[in-house]
Amino acid sequence: MGLMTNGSTAEASGLKFLIYGRTGWIGGLLGRLCEAQGIPYAYGDGRLENRSQLEADVAAAGPTHVFNAAGVTGRPNVDWCETHQVETIRANVVGTLTLADVCRERALVLINYATGCIFEYDDAHPLGSGIGFKEEDTPNFTGSFYSKTKAMVEELLKNYENVCTLRVRMPISSDLSNPRNFITKISRYEKVVNIPNSMTILDELLPISIEMAKRNLTGIWNFTNPGVVNHNEILEMYRDYIDPNFTWKNFSLEEQAKVIVAPRSNNELGTTRLKNEFPELLPIKESLIKYVFKPNQKTPAA
């Protein structure tokens, strides 16, 4: 496993993180953030569904906090989960619950990167209304098997007082070459829908998740930037800041349904709880410009 640190001040504070998801996008970013902040960390080697392996990881690392950025989202997308349902359950339900239980036995806070793709606009939360789903709301989207398993495990994790559940949505980072990046995905699609959604700017929010661990915060948190942004607004920014010749085409949800296996979640999550804890959190469009488009700017002026 091997503990990694750059020997900075965090070591003196007694922090030590155990991270699952070494080969994943968020897991890799977490390791880099720990290095930048001088926080000793180790990646877990065990498979989430193997309790004895997790117990060995915890014994070897001796962590103060555990981060779960592992699980199954499907490659190239969540449609994979429709035809690999047992594998999806094993990682997303059995594995996550096993890790939460191992952590609880040792009084360890588990920061669990979950999903907000368990809701869809409805009569009480209409599209464009600015009324977001709250942390205590019951998931209403089960259109994909992936979302179904995530809603299941979120409900069960409510019983674990040591777990901090972070509802991530349509994650975006400043690394526009990463195929998991929502901007990278939609910039490569032949056609895109155009629907306002809550989204997570990782460059801003992942450091906040580390701060949440330091504060030992638990419970469910909508882990997105305040407000919504639609596909066209993002692609307009991409054109204005990155590629002035970029063009795209829209299509309807009905047309989209013909080229995907499982329906996709579209929603707005309320961020009052997160904003109260972290008042500096930027609205989604401001965060996109500051953390993603300005650092990558290739056009003379936007």
Image: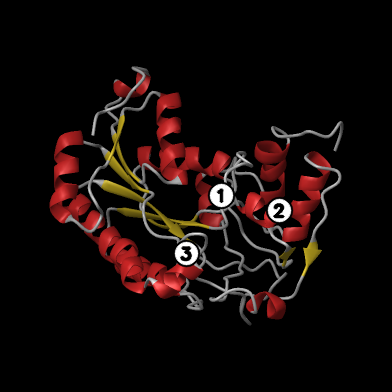
Amino acid on which disc 1 is placed: Lys
Identity of the residue drawn at 57% across and 40% down: 204
Give the residue at x 46% y 70%: 147
Q: Residue 16 appears at what percent x and percent y?
A: 28, 32
Asked if residue 158 shows in the view, the reply is no
Crowdedness of circle 3 by 10 Å Cα count: few (<14), some, many (20+)? many
In the rendered image, which residue does mark 3 sit on? 135
Whole-percent x, y for residue 291 in the image: 65, 38
Residue 256 sits in quarter: bottom right
Q: Secondary structure at mark 3?
A: loop
Viewer-closest of 22 and 206: 22
Dot 3 and dot 2 residues touching (CB under 8 Å): no
Q: What label does residue 275 carry, if any?
A: 1
Image quarter (top left, top right, bottom left or bottom right) of the N terminus: top left
Does dot 2 land on a helix, a strand or a loop? helix
Q: CA distance from mark 1 to mark 2?
A: 30 Å
Quick check: 254 left or right of 84? right
Kindly state the secondary structure of the residue where label 1 is placed: helix
Give the camera-side residue of 84 and 205. 84
Task: Kindly report the distance in space between the C-alpha atoms of the residues bearing marks 3 and 2.
Answer: 31 Å
Foreground disc of the pair 1, 2 = 2
- How far apart marks 3 and 1 lie (CA) works out to 13 Å
Which sits earlier in the primary sequence, circle 3 or circle 1? 3
Query: Residue 187 shows which numbered tag?
Result: 2
- Relative to the observer, which residue lies in front, 119 or 31? 31
Residue 230 vs 277, above or below: the answer is: below
